[in-house]
Amino acid sequence: AIPYAIRLILTEYFTTAAATALAIGTGDFTTLLWCKSTDVTTTQIVLRWGNTAGSWANQNANGLYQDAGSWIGHSRTAAEGIKSVSGTATVNVWEFAVVTRNGGTVRLYINGVEVGTPATGADISITPDGIMRLGAAPSDAAFPIQDALVTQAAIFNKALTAAEILNLWNKGR
């Protein structure tokens, strides 16, 4: 059961102070959260961490997005391109969304199950200034959440295993 959540609407978002621990280079990571959205058809950034230089589309960044009825797990730099994988998003339902990067592979899990086709290729080096934003892009608040409840957002400096993700899903529902 979800006991507490933050409601984010349009221009509302949360930003962390800069943290050098988020500058992981080509290291592994996991980003996760629980989310219940009233609109999954609009492009909206649910959780994103990266640098604040330039427009949101040109940043070194990682995150979880919703667009056109899908969850999108994402890792990118302007120079090296984008790795993303998507799976179906459901309106007005609590969903546990997780994106991991392990070596050169980005994976997306929804409700404890891997979805989509893993994105592979060269490692993308993430050297952000350590800003994390829940509900919008770090630089300019682009593509804000339209209306959603969000809770238990977390970033790990390792790729959680499928078993660890399933265990978190089972404990949280």
Image (cartoon, rainbow, N blue to C red):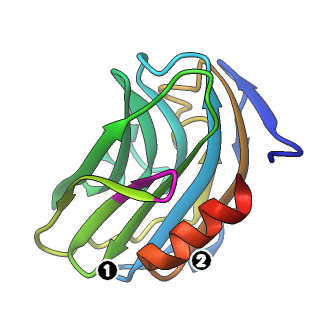
Question: Taking the image as drawn, is residue 79 in sight?
Answer: no
Q: Is residue 19 above or below residue 153?
A: below
Query: Nearer the viewer's eye, disc 2 or disc 1?
Result: 1
Q: Is residue 107 above or below residue 26?
A: above
Occupied quadrant, residue 147: top right
Place of residue 68 in the rendered image (x, y in percent of width and height, measured from the top left): 33, 21
Q: What's under tag 2, amino acid-wise?
A: Thr
Q: Is residue 80 left or right of residue 173?
A: left
Q: Which numbered tag is attached to residue 20?
A: 2
Q: Residue furthest right?
A: 3
Q: What's drawn in magenta, residue-wise?
A: 108-112
Could you say whether the residue bearing mark 2 is in a helix, strand or loop?
Answer: helix
Q: Is residue 71 above or below residue 29?
A: above
- Say whether residue 71 is magenta: no
Q: Is residue 162 above or below residue 144?
A: below
Which residue: 80% across, 37% down?
6
Place of residue 90 in the rendered image (x, y in percent of width and height, measured from the top left): 49, 27
Could you say whether the residue bearing mark 1 is in a helix, strand or loop?
Answer: loop
Q: Which numbered tag is attached to residue 26?
A: 1
Which residue: 52% across, 80% down?
157
